[in-house]
Image (cartoon, grey):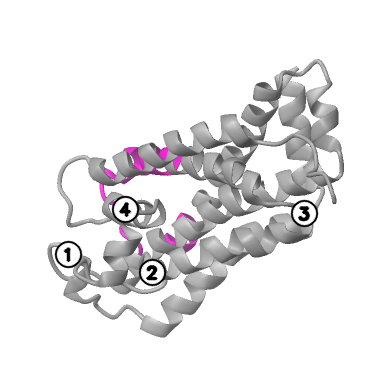
Amino acid sequence: MMSSELKYQQLSYWRNPLGAFFTFFMPVMFLVIFGSLYNNQKAPSVLDAGGAISFDQYFVPAILTLGVISACYTQLAIQLSNQRDAGLLKRVRSSPLPPAAYLFTVVLSCLIRTAVLVGITLAVGGLFYGLVFPAHAALALVVVVGIASVTFSAIGIAITAAIPNADAAPAIVNGIYLPLMFISGTFFPLSSSSILTKIASYFPVRPFVQASFAALNPLVHGSGIEWHEVGAMVIWCALALVVGVRCFRWTPARKG
């Protein structure tokens, strides 16, 4: 039953080619923009990279985080809010498929899209922007992106509890998401001593950016996994799961 639901989730997504196109096109578009702006310049010491490194080597993993969060958090929160207002979630809850199994397949569908998105972003970075793939990159990225995908999917489910209706979903979701992307160093490197960096470190976006950068940093020795940053995402995942279990609504809010 779960496999059938997963197949339906995938078919439903890919039958909306325009939405799918922008999911995968947006990170590539930002990568092209920033790659053109900095054109292989050396990044400043604020990256704490352990030596000279090109901006492209920073921006590929940073923009990769943008795509993953968009695919897992933004799209999932808006999708569930729309389905809830349309009465689809209410029907799912009354079907033979367990509610937890439905949410599991929704998250698994996000993970599949994320894998495709990461592959495209890394391919573009490698082919056109001289991205260096260190020996530790494969395992480190699997760990970091896997945990981040689950974490931001859980946050996407949890945030629906604060969304009153589908019309408000894009404003609430993006109102939280976009400021955090800017203060977390996604679009430009930030000094670790910056007040914005210190604020961002309490939220899950900054740890994801830092962990992704470490995974693809050719100057890093060892596994390339920043366990401190991964641990921060795991904590956020646990908190989101608690909120999701307690507060997730399957039916629209009552009006009046």
Counting other residues with Cα less than 10 Å from the Cα at mark 2, is it few (<14), some (14-19), or many (20 or more)?
A: many
How far apart are the two marked residues, 1 and 3, measured between alpha carbons? 42 Å
**Which mark sits nearer the N-terminus, 1 or 2?**
1
Front label number (4 vs 3): 3
Counting other residues with Cα less than 10 Å from the Cα at mark 1, is it few (<14), some (14-19), or many (20 or more)?
A: few
- 11 left or right, relative to 173: right
The image shows residue 154 at horizontal and vertical percentages of 54, 39
The image shows residue 129 at horizontal and vertical percentages of 40, 69
Q: Residue at x 57, y 47 (%)?
A: 72
**Which mark sits nearer the N-terminus, 1 or 3?**
1
Q: Which residue has dot 2 on it?
A: 183
| Magenta range | 122-147
Q: Residue at x 51, y 33 (%)?
A: 241
The image shows residue 128 at horizontal and vertical percentages of 44, 69
Q: Amino acid at mark 1?
A: Asp
SS class of the residue under badge 3? helix
SS class of the residue under badge 4? loop
Counting other residues with Cα less than 10 Å from the Cα at mark 3, is it few (<14), some (14-19), or many (20 or more)?
A: many
How far apart are the two marked residues, 1 and 2, measured between alpha carbons? 17 Å
Q: Amino acid at mark 3?
A: Ala
SS class of the residue under badge 1? loop
**Which mark sits nearer the N-terminus, 1 or 4?**
1
Front label number (1 vs 2): 2
**Which mark sits nearer the N-terminus, 3 or 2?**
3
Q: Which residue has dot 1 on it?
A: 48
How far apart are the two marked residues, 4 and 3, measured between alpha carbons? 41 Å
* Residue 166 disc label: 3
How far apart are the two marked residues, 4 and 2, measured between alpha carbons? 26 Å
Q: Residue at x 50, y 74 (%)?
A: 32
**Which mark sits nearer the N-terminus, 4 or 2?**
4
Counting other residues with Cα less than 10 Å from the Cα at mark 4, is it few (<14), some (14-19), or many (20 or more)?
A: some
